[in-house]
Image (tube, helix red, strand yellow):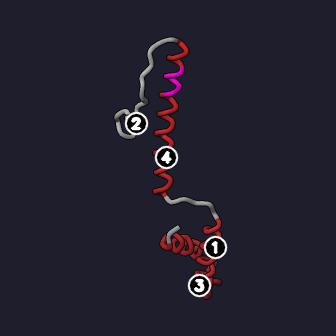
Amino acid sequence: MDTFRIDEIARKLLERVPPALRSMQADLETNFRAVLRERLSKLDLVSRDEFDAQTRVLERTRAQLEALEARLTALEGGAPAPLTPRDPGRGTAPTR
């Protein structure tokens, strides 16, 4: 998680602190940031780019699976089946 978001979360936490404790604002803010960084670093998180890339891979894999299932159904039924599955990410059939 980037520093800006951690700082934003720390600021929001600090706003919730009672006014009597705000005299220790600098210490609280530093501690909030340290605890947030430590806890967030222990989470198994991926970047948005990696998530989006994996989503695209999954979409292509699902499309290929559906095409293979259709071919299998056609072969079992004796009807002709397409030779290559369509790739929804590119709009064209992949070549072999």
Q: Where, by quadrant of the figure, is residue 40 drawn?
A: bottom right
Residue bearing mark 4:
55
Region of the chain picked out in magenta, as a range: 68-72
Q: Earlier in the sequence, mark 3 or mark 4?
A: 3
Q: Residue at x 62, y 60 (%)?
A: 44
Residue 55: percent from left, percent from top: 49, 46
The 10 Å Cα crowd at callout 4, few under 14, some 14 to 19, many 20 or more, is few
Q: Secondary structure at mark 2?
A: loop
| 70 is within the stretch colored magenta | yes
CA gap, disc 2 and disc 4: 13 Å
Residue bearing mark 1:
38
Is 43 placed left or right of 47 in the picture? Answer: right
**Between marks 2 and 3 in the image, the one whose residue lies nearer the viewer:** 2
Q: Secondary structure at mark 4?
A: helix
Answer whether labels 2 and 4 touch (C-beta < 8 Å).
Answer: no
**Between marks 1 and 3 in the image, the one whose residue lies nearer the viewer:** 1
Q: Earlier in the sequence, mark 1 or mark 2?
A: 1
Q: Amino acid at mark 2?
A: Pro
